[in-house]
Image: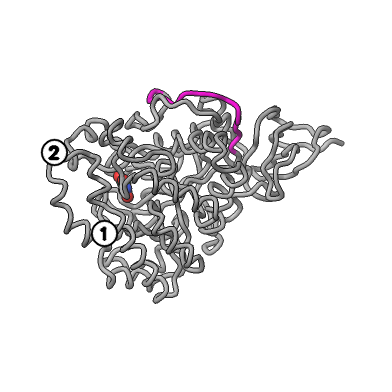
Amino acid sequence: MADRYDLLLRGGTVATPAGLASIDIGVRDGRIAALGDLSRAEAAETQDCTGLHVLPGVIDSQVHFREPGGEHKEDLETGTAGAAAGGVTAIFEMPNTSPLTTSAEALQDKLDRAAGRAWVDHAFFVGGTAANAHRLAELERLPGSAGVKIFMGSSTGDLLSEDDGTIARVMANGVRRVSVHAEDEMRLRERKTMVESGAPARMHPEWRDVETAVRATKRILSLSAAARRRVHVLHVTTGEEMTILAGHKDLATVEATPQHLTFAGPDCYDRLGSRAQMNPPIRDAAQRDTLWRAIASGVVDVLGSDHAPHTLEEKAKPYPESPSGMTGVQTLVPVMLDHVAAGRLTLERLVDLTSAGPARIFGIAGKGRIVVGYDADFTIVDLKARRTITDSWIRSRSAWTPYDGVEVTGWPIATIVRGMAVMREDELLEGPRGAPVRFQECLP
Ligand code: DOR
Protein backbone atom coordinates (compact mmCIF):
# COMPACT_ATOMS: atom_id res chain seq x y z
CA MET A 1 0.00 0.00 0.00
CA ALA A 2 1.27 3.49 -0.84
CA ASP A 3 2.26 5.76 2.04
CA ARG A 4 -0.34 8.40 2.75
CA TYR A 5 0.27 11.96 3.91
CA ASP A 6 -1.88 14.97 4.74
CA LEU A 7 0.22 17.14 2.42
CA LEU A 8 2.83 16.41 -0.22
CA LEU A 9 5.18 19.06 -1.60
CA ARG A 10 6.42 17.65 -4.89
CA GLY A 11 9.18 18.60 -7.26
CA GLY A 12 10.73 21.53 -5.41
CA THR A 13 14.34 22.31 -4.60
CA VAL A 14 14.47 21.86 -0.85
CA ALA A 15 16.87 23.65 1.51
CA THR A 16 17.94 20.82 3.83
CA PRO A 17 20.71 21.00 6.46
CA ALA A 18 22.86 19.04 3.98
CA GLY A 19 22.30 21.52 1.17
CA LEU A 20 19.84 22.04 -1.67
CA ALA A 21 18.18 18.82 -2.81
CA SER A 22 15.53 17.88 -5.40
CA ILE A 23 13.24 15.91 -3.10
CA ASP A 24 9.59 15.64 -2.11
CA ILE A 25 8.28 16.35 1.39
CA GLY A 26 5.53 14.34 3.08
CA VAL A 27 3.66 15.98 5.97
CA ARG A 28 1.54 14.19 8.54
CA ASP A 29 -0.10 15.67 11.67
CA GLY A 30 1.66 18.99 11.17
CA ARG A 31 5.15 17.48 11.16
CA ILE A 32 7.60 16.49 8.44
CA ALA A 33 7.04 12.74 8.05
CA ALA A 34 9.21 11.87 5.05
CA LEU A 35 11.80 13.38 2.70
CA GLY A 36 12.94 11.87 -0.59
CA ASP A 37 11.35 10.45 -3.71
CA LEU A 38 7.68 10.22 -2.71
CA SER A 39 6.35 9.80 -6.24
CA ARG A 40 4.38 6.70 -5.24
CA ALA A 41 2.87 8.24 -2.13
CA GLU A 42 -0.69 9.52 -1.81
CA ALA A 43 -1.87 12.61 -0.02
CA ALA A 44 -5.02 14.49 0.89
CA GLU A 45 -3.44 17.53 -0.72
CA THR A 46 -0.51 17.88 -3.11
CA GLN A 47 1.32 21.08 -3.98
CA ASP A 48 3.42 21.13 -7.13
CA CYS A 49 6.64 22.98 -6.27
CA THR A 50 8.33 22.53 -9.66
CA GLY A 51 10.58 25.52 -10.32
CA LEU A 52 10.26 26.69 -6.71
CA HIS A 53 12.52 26.52 -3.65
CA VAL A 54 11.17 25.16 -0.37
CA LEU A 55 12.88 26.83 2.61
CA PRO A 56 12.38 26.06 6.30
CA GLY A 57 9.75 28.46 7.62
CA VAL A 58 11.18 31.94 8.15
CA ILE A 59 11.23 32.99 11.82
CA ASP A 60 11.18 36.75 12.42
CA SER A 61 12.50 37.13 15.96
CA GLN A 62 11.83 40.88 16.26
CA VAL A 63 8.43 42.43 15.56
CA HIS A 64 6.25 45.02 17.31
CA PHE A 65 2.54 44.29 16.82
CA ARG A 66 1.20 47.03 19.15
CA GLU A 67 -1.59 45.03 20.81
CA PRO A 68 -2.67 45.91 23.43
CA GLY A 69 -2.67 49.69 23.46
CA GLY A 70 -1.67 50.68 19.92
CA GLU A 71 -4.26 48.89 17.81
CA HIS A 72 -4.68 51.92 15.55
CA LYS A 73 -1.19 51.10 14.23
CA GLU A 74 -1.36 47.27 14.24
CA ASP A 75 -2.82 44.32 16.10
CA LEU A 76 -1.97 40.66 16.43
CA GLU A 77 -4.29 39.73 13.57
CA THR A 78 -3.09 42.32 11.06
CA GLY A 79 0.56 41.92 12.08
CA THR A 80 0.51 38.14 11.70
CA ALA A 81 -1.46 38.44 8.45
CA GLY A 82 1.45 40.51 7.14
CA ALA A 83 3.84 37.82 8.33
CA ALA A 84 1.89 35.09 6.51
CA ALA A 85 1.62 37.21 3.36
CA GLY A 86 5.37 37.77 3.43
CA GLY A 87 6.38 34.13 3.86
CA VAL A 88 7.08 34.30 7.62
CA THR A 89 5.85 31.29 9.63
CA ALA A 90 6.69 32.39 13.20
CA ILE A 91 7.25 35.69 14.98
CA PHE A 92 8.60 36.86 18.35
CA GLU A 93 6.80 40.00 19.48
CA MET A 94 8.27 42.79 21.60
CA PRO A 95 7.09 43.93 25.06
CA ASN A 96 6.82 47.72 24.52
CA THR A 97 3.04 47.63 24.26
CA SER A 98 0.61 49.35 26.61
CA PRO A 99 0.46 47.92 29.19
CA LEU A 100 4.04 46.71 28.95
CA THR A 101 4.57 42.94 28.81
CA THR A 102 6.34 42.77 32.16
CA SER A 103 4.14 40.36 34.13
CA ALA A 104 2.69 36.86 33.82
CA GLU A 105 -0.77 38.41 33.39
CA ALA A 106 0.33 40.64 30.52
CA LEU A 107 2.04 37.70 28.78
CA GLN A 108 -1.03 35.50 29.20
CA ASP A 109 -3.21 38.34 27.90
CA LYS A 110 -1.17 38.43 24.66
CA LEU A 111 -1.36 34.64 24.30
CA ASP A 112 -5.14 34.78 24.82
CA ARG A 113 -5.50 37.57 22.28
CA ALA A 114 -3.40 35.64 19.74
CA ALA A 115 -5.45 32.43 20.09
CA GLY A 116 -7.71 32.15 17.02
CA ARG A 117 -6.45 35.46 15.62
CA ALA A 118 -2.76 34.89 14.84
CA TRP A 119 -2.01 33.62 11.34
CA VAL A 120 1.45 32.31 12.28
CA ASP A 121 3.15 30.78 15.29
CA HIS A 122 4.27 33.25 17.92
CA ALA A 123 6.07 33.95 21.17
CA PHE A 124 6.23 37.12 23.25
CA PHE A 125 9.21 38.76 24.92
CA VAL A 126 8.94 39.86 28.55
CA GLY A 127 10.39 43.31 29.25
CA GLY A 128 13.11 43.35 31.92
CA THR A 129 12.95 46.32 34.32
CA ALA A 130 14.03 47.29 37.83
CA ALA A 131 10.49 46.58 39.03
CA ASN A 132 10.18 42.99 37.78
CA ALA A 133 13.86 41.91 37.88
CA HIS A 134 13.28 39.59 40.85
CA ARG A 135 10.54 37.70 38.95
CA LEU A 136 12.29 37.26 35.60
CA ALA A 137 13.62 33.74 36.19
CA GLU A 138 10.01 32.64 36.50
CA LEU A 139 8.62 34.89 33.74
CA GLU A 140 11.14 33.83 31.10
CA ARG A 141 10.12 30.17 31.51
CA LEU A 142 6.39 30.64 31.03
CA PRO A 143 4.85 28.98 27.96
CA GLY A 144 4.88 31.38 25.00
CA SER A 145 7.70 33.51 26.43
CA ALA A 146 10.54 34.22 23.98
CA GLY A 147 12.74 35.34 26.89
CA VAL A 148 13.68 38.73 28.30
CA LYS A 149 14.19 41.95 26.31
CA ILE A 150 15.75 45.14 27.61
CA PHE A 151 15.91 48.62 26.13
CA MET A 152 19.15 50.36 27.21
CA GLY A 153 18.07 53.46 25.27
CA SER A 154 14.56 54.86 25.01
CA SER A 155 12.59 54.26 21.87
CA THR A 156 8.83 53.83 21.34
CA GLY A 157 6.99 53.27 24.66
CA ASP A 158 8.12 53.39 28.29
CA LEU A 159 10.37 50.37 28.57
CA LEU A 160 13.84 51.38 29.75
CA SER A 161 16.67 49.82 31.76
CA GLU A 162 19.31 52.48 31.29
CA ASP A 163 21.80 52.03 34.14
CA ASP A 164 24.25 49.21 34.77
CA GLY A 165 22.79 48.47 38.22
CA THR A 166 19.32 47.78 36.79
CA ILE A 167 20.68 45.75 33.90
CA ALA A 168 22.84 43.70 36.28
CA ARG A 169 19.77 42.92 38.37
CA VAL A 170 17.84 41.83 35.27
CA MET A 171 20.76 39.66 34.15
CA ALA A 172 21.12 38.06 37.58
CA ASN A 173 17.68 36.45 37.34
CA GLY A 174 17.26 33.65 34.83
CA VAL A 175 19.31 31.67 32.37
CA ARG A 176 17.99 32.30 28.86
CA ARG A 177 19.72 34.62 26.42
CA VAL A 178 18.66 38.25 27.03
CA SER A 179 17.80 40.33 23.95
CA VAL A 180 19.08 43.90 24.07
CA HIS A 181 18.40 47.20 22.33
CA ALA A 182 21.88 48.70 22.67
CA GLU A 183 21.83 52.51 22.58
CA ASP A 184 23.27 54.48 25.50
CA GLU A 185 20.48 56.49 27.13
CA MET A 186 22.83 58.92 28.93
CA ARG A 187 24.48 59.93 25.65
CA LEU A 188 21.10 60.17 23.88
CA ARG A 189 19.92 62.57 26.58
CA GLU A 190 23.09 64.71 26.41
CA ARG A 191 22.81 65.09 22.64
CA LYS A 192 19.04 65.50 22.28
CA THR A 193 19.38 69.31 21.92
CA MET A 194 20.93 68.70 18.47
CA VAL A 195 17.51 67.82 17.13
CA GLU A 196 15.13 70.45 18.42
CA SER A 197 11.77 70.58 16.65
CA GLY A 198 11.91 71.06 12.91
CA ALA A 199 15.38 69.56 12.39
CA PRO A 200 15.57 67.39 9.24
CA ALA A 201 15.18 63.62 9.71
CA ARG A 202 18.69 63.16 8.29
CA MET A 203 19.92 64.40 11.71
CA HIS A 204 18.69 61.15 13.27
CA PRO A 205 22.01 59.27 12.83
CA GLU A 206 23.88 62.38 14.06
CA TRP A 207 21.94 62.49 17.31
CA ARG A 208 21.86 58.70 17.82
CA ASP A 209 25.44 58.42 16.60
CA VAL A 210 27.89 55.54 16.24
CA GLU A 211 29.34 56.21 19.70
CA THR A 212 25.84 55.93 21.24
CA ALA A 213 25.55 52.38 19.90
CA VAL A 214 29.17 51.38 20.58
CA ARG A 215 29.05 52.51 24.23
CA ALA A 216 25.92 50.50 24.92
CA THR A 217 27.25 47.39 23.18
CA LYS A 218 30.51 47.58 25.17
CA ARG A 219 28.53 48.00 28.39
CA ILE A 220 26.23 45.05 27.70
CA LEU A 221 29.21 42.81 26.91
CA SER A 222 30.83 43.68 30.26
CA LEU A 223 27.55 43.09 32.07
CA SER A 224 27.08 39.82 30.22
CA ALA A 225 30.56 38.61 31.20
CA ALA A 226 30.05 39.66 34.83
CA ALA A 227 26.68 37.91 35.05
CA ARG A 228 27.85 34.88 33.04
CA ARG A 229 24.64 35.29 31.05
CA ARG A 230 24.47 35.32 27.27
CA VAL A 231 22.94 38.19 25.33
CA HIS A 232 21.54 38.81 21.86
CA VAL A 233 22.33 42.27 20.50
CA LEU A 234 19.45 43.40 18.32
CA HIS A 235 19.71 45.45 15.10
CA VAL A 236 23.45 46.13 15.13
CA THR A 237 24.22 49.08 12.84
CA THR A 238 27.96 49.80 12.96
CA GLY A 239 31.17 48.15 11.85
CA GLU A 240 32.72 49.20 15.17
CA GLU A 241 30.21 47.05 17.06
CA MET A 242 30.61 44.16 14.61
CA THR A 243 34.36 44.13 15.30
CA ILE A 244 33.80 44.12 19.07
CA LEU A 245 31.05 41.48 18.83
CA ALA A 246 33.25 39.25 16.65
CA GLY A 247 35.59 39.05 19.64
CA HIS A 248 32.80 37.95 21.99
CA LYS A 249 30.91 35.24 20.15
CA ASP A 250 30.91 33.16 23.34
CA LEU A 251 28.77 35.81 25.05
CA ALA A 252 26.76 37.54 22.37
CA THR A 253 24.77 36.70 19.28
CA VAL A 254 24.00 39.37 16.71
CA GLU A 255 20.97 40.51 14.71
CA ALA A 256 20.98 42.66 11.58
CA THR A 257 17.89 44.00 9.80
CA PRO A 258 17.03 44.07 6.09
CA GLN A 259 16.53 47.85 6.21
CA HIS A 260 20.02 48.52 7.62
CA LEU A 261 21.39 46.25 4.87
CA THR A 262 19.36 47.97 2.14
CA PHE A 263 19.04 51.69 2.85
CA ALA A 264 21.76 54.27 3.48
CA GLY A 265 21.76 57.89 4.57
CA PRO A 266 21.60 60.64 3.58
CA ASP A 267 19.81 59.39 0.45
CA CYS A 268 17.11 57.41 2.32
CA TYR A 269 16.25 60.45 4.48
CA ASP A 270 16.06 62.70 1.41
CA ARG A 271 13.73 60.22 -0.32
CA LEU A 272 11.67 58.90 2.59
CA GLY A 273 11.96 61.60 5.28
CA SER A 274 10.82 60.32 8.66
CA ARG A 275 9.67 57.03 7.08
CA ALA A 276 13.36 56.13 7.19
CA GLN A 277 13.56 57.09 10.88
CA MET A 278 14.13 54.17 13.21
CA ASN A 279 16.21 53.28 16.28
CA PRO A 280 19.05 52.58 15.99
CA PRO A 281 19.22 54.69 12.84
CA ILE A 282 19.94 53.85 9.23
CA ARG A 283 23.55 55.01 8.79
CA ASP A 284 25.73 55.77 5.75
CA ALA A 285 26.78 53.51 2.87
CA ALA A 286 30.20 52.80 4.44
CA GLN A 287 28.51 51.46 7.58
CA ARG A 288 26.08 49.46 5.45
CA ASP A 289 29.08 47.82 3.74
CA THR A 290 30.46 46.78 7.13
CA LEU A 291 27.15 45.07 7.93
CA TRP A 292 27.40 43.07 4.70
CA ARG A 293 30.94 42.05 5.65
CA ALA A 294 29.60 40.84 9.01
CA ILE A 295 26.93 38.82 7.17
CA ALA A 296 29.66 37.25 5.00
CA SER A 297 32.03 36.50 7.88
CA GLY A 298 29.38 34.89 10.08
CA VAL A 299 29.35 37.49 12.88
CA VAL A 300 25.63 38.02 12.24
CA ASP A 301 23.49 35.16 13.59
CA VAL A 302 19.98 36.21 12.58
CA LEU A 303 17.98 38.69 10.56
CA GLY A 304 14.99 40.26 12.29
CA SER A 305 12.68 42.77 10.64
CA ASP A 306 12.13 45.05 13.66
CA HIS A 307 8.67 45.56 12.16
CA ALA A 308 7.60 48.71 14.02
CA PRO A 309 4.51 50.23 12.43
CA HIS A 310 3.32 53.80 12.97
CA THR A 311 0.55 55.48 10.99
CA LEU A 312 1.47 57.90 8.22
CA GLU A 313 -0.24 60.69 10.20
CA GLU A 314 2.08 59.97 13.14
CA LYS A 315 5.07 59.79 10.80
CA ALA A 316 4.07 63.16 9.28
CA LYS A 317 4.73 65.01 12.57
CA PRO A 318 7.80 67.24 12.35
CA TYR A 319 11.05 65.42 13.24
CA PRO A 320 11.92 64.52 16.02
CA GLU A 321 8.31 64.27 17.26
CA SER A 322 7.76 61.76 14.44
CA PRO A 323 7.93 58.26 15.93
CA SER A 324 10.76 55.85 15.05
CA GLY A 325 10.06 52.62 13.23
CA MET A 326 8.89 51.20 9.91
CA THR A 327 6.99 48.13 8.79
CA GLY A 328 9.08 45.14 7.75
CA VAL A 329 7.68 41.71 8.59
CA GLN A 330 6.03 41.34 5.17
CA THR A 331 9.00 42.61 3.17
CA LEU A 332 11.79 40.66 4.93
CA VAL A 333 11.65 37.68 2.56
CA PRO A 334 11.28 39.48 -0.79
CA VAL A 335 13.88 42.12 0.09
CA MET A 336 16.40 39.48 1.20
CA LEU A 337 15.67 37.27 -1.84
CA ASP A 338 16.45 40.31 -3.98
CA HIS A 339 19.82 40.56 -2.22
CA VAL A 340 20.32 36.85 -2.98
CA ALA A 341 19.50 37.52 -6.65
CA ALA A 342 22.02 40.37 -6.64
CA GLY A 343 24.70 38.01 -5.29
CA ARG A 344 25.12 39.71 -1.90
CA LEU A 345 24.52 36.46 0.02
CA THR A 346 23.69 32.87 -0.86
CA LEU A 347 20.29 31.29 -0.39
CA GLU A 348 21.89 28.87 2.10
CA ARG A 349 23.22 31.78 4.17
CA LEU A 350 19.80 33.41 4.11
CA VAL A 351 18.23 30.20 5.47
CA ASP A 352 20.89 30.13 8.18
CA LEU A 353 19.99 33.71 9.16
CA THR A 354 16.20 33.37 9.10
CA SER A 355 15.48 29.78 10.20
CA ALA A 356 18.40 27.78 11.58
CA GLY A 357 19.90 30.88 13.26
CA PRO A 358 16.87 31.88 15.35
CA ALA A 359 16.19 28.22 16.21
CA ARG A 360 19.78 27.80 17.42
CA ILE A 361 20.18 30.96 19.46
CA PHE A 362 16.74 30.95 21.09
CA GLY A 363 16.57 27.16 21.54
CA ILE A 364 13.33 26.77 19.60
CA ALA A 365 11.92 23.24 19.78
CA GLY A 366 11.15 21.56 16.44
CA LYS A 367 11.50 24.48 14.05
CA GLY A 368 14.14 26.00 11.77
CA ARG A 369 15.25 23.01 9.68
CA ILE A 370 13.72 20.69 7.12
CA VAL A 371 14.27 17.41 8.94
CA VAL A 372 11.91 14.49 9.63
CA GLY A 373 10.13 15.07 12.93
CA TYR A 374 10.32 18.88 12.76
CA ASP A 375 7.24 21.10 12.40
CA ALA A 376 6.07 21.29 8.78
CA ASP A 377 6.78 25.04 8.48
CA PHE A 378 7.80 26.09 4.97
CA THR A 379 8.46 29.29 3.08
CA ILE A 380 8.06 28.41 -0.60
CA VAL A 381 9.72 30.96 -2.86
CA ASP A 382 10.19 31.71 -6.53
CA LEU A 383 13.74 33.02 -6.90
CA LYS A 384 13.03 34.31 -10.43
CA ALA A 385 9.72 36.12 -9.90
CA ARG A 386 10.00 39.86 -10.52
CA ARG A 387 7.44 41.82 -8.54
CA THR A 388 7.04 45.35 -7.29
CA ILE A 389 6.50 45.95 -3.57
CA THR A 390 3.67 48.46 -3.05
CA ASP A 391 1.86 50.02 -0.12
CA SER A 392 -1.36 48.37 -1.34
CA TRP A 393 0.16 44.87 -0.85
CA ILE A 394 0.97 45.63 2.80
CA ARG A 395 -1.43 44.05 5.33
CA SER A 396 -0.22 46.07 8.31
CA ARG A 397 -2.90 48.38 9.67
CA SER A 398 -0.41 51.20 9.11
CA ALA A 399 -0.54 50.29 5.39
CA TRP A 400 2.80 51.55 4.16
CA THR A 401 6.29 50.28 3.47
CA PRO A 402 9.58 52.10 2.91
CA TYR A 403 9.99 49.83 -0.17
CA ASP A 404 6.87 51.17 -1.96
CA GLY A 405 7.62 51.06 -5.71
CA VAL A 406 10.76 48.94 -5.36
CA GLU A 407 11.05 46.08 -7.86
CA VAL A 408 12.53 42.88 -6.47
CA THR A 409 13.63 39.54 -7.89
CA GLY A 410 12.38 36.73 -5.64
CA TRP A 411 8.96 36.39 -4.01
CA PRO A 412 7.23 34.22 -1.38
CA ILE A 413 4.73 31.98 -3.18
CA ALA A 414 3.34 30.03 -0.23
CA THR A 415 3.54 30.05 3.58
CA ILE A 416 2.90 26.74 5.32
CA VAL A 417 2.56 26.60 9.12
CA ARG A 418 2.57 23.10 10.67
CA GLY A 419 1.24 21.66 7.42
CA MET A 420 -1.45 24.31 6.91
CA ALA A 421 -1.12 26.54 3.85
CA VAL A 422 -1.88 29.99 5.23
CA MET A 423 -0.79 31.91 2.11
CA ARG A 424 -0.66 31.00 -1.57
CA GLU A 425 -0.05 33.49 -4.39
CA ASP A 426 -0.66 36.52 -2.14
CA GLU A 427 -4.01 35.16 -0.85
CA LEU A 428 -4.49 34.24 2.82
CA LEU A 429 -6.10 30.79 3.29
CA GLU A 430 -7.18 28.39 6.04
CA GLY A 431 -7.70 31.00 8.75
CA PRO A 432 -5.65 32.20 11.70
CA ARG A 433 -4.48 29.07 13.52
CA GLY A 434 -1.08 30.13 14.84
CA ALA A 435 0.10 28.49 18.06
CA PRO A 436 2.71 29.41 20.67
CA VAL A 437 6.30 28.53 19.76
CA ARG A 438 7.90 25.99 22.12
CA PHE A 439 11.41 26.36 23.53
CA GLN A 440 13.82 23.60 24.51
CA GLU A 441 14.69 25.11 27.89
CA CYS A 442 11.02 25.45 28.85
CA LEU A 443 9.44 22.21 27.67
CA PRO A 444 7.01 20.87 30.26
O1 DOR B 1 12.61 52.32 15.58
C1 DOR B 1 12.21 51.63 16.50
N1 DOR B 1 10.89 51.48 16.73
N2 DOR B 1 13.09 51.03 17.30
C2 DOR B 1 12.69 50.41 18.43
O2 DOR B 1 13.54 49.92 19.14
C3 DOR B 1 11.28 50.38 18.82
C4 DOR B 1 10.42 50.51 17.65
C5 DOR B 1 8.98 50.75 17.99
O3 DOR B 1 8.43 50.04 18.82
O4 DOR B 1 8.38 51.66 17.39
**Which quadrant holds residue 43?**
top right
Reply yes or no: does residue 380 show up in magenta: yes
Q: Which of 88 and 422 is in front in this view?
A: 88
Prevalent SS, magenta region: strand
Residue highlighted by disc 1: 160
Of helix, strand and loop, which one carries label 2?
loop
Residue displayed at 70% across by 29% down = 46
Query: What span is in magenta?
Result: 379-392
Q: Quadrant of the N terminus?
A: top right
Query: Whole-percent x and y of residue 291?
Result: 45, 50
Q: What residue type is labelled 1?
A: Leu
Give coordinates of residue 112: x percent, y percent.
40, 47
Residue ID for mark 2: 198
Do the residues bearing badges 1 and 2 touch, measured as CB atoms within 8 Å?
A: no
Tell me if I can see residue 126 in this picture: yes
In the picture, measured across the screen, residue 439 lies left or right of residue 257, that is right
Q: What separation in Å lies between label 1 and label 2 (alpha carbons)?
A: 26 Å
Viewer-side residue, 305 vs 196? 196
Please, what is the three-letter code of the amino acid marked with disc 2? Gly
Q: Is residue 20 left or right of residue 250?
A: right
Would you place residue 407 above or below residue 213 in this image? Answer: above
Callout 2 environment at 10 Å: few (<14), some (14 to 19), or many (20+)? few
The magenta stretch spans residue 184: no
Percent of width and height locating residue 109:
36, 50
Q: In this view, does 206 lie above or below 116?
A: below
Task: Say which label, 1 or 2, has the lower sequence index.
Answer: 1
Residue 21, x across and y down, in percent: 73, 41
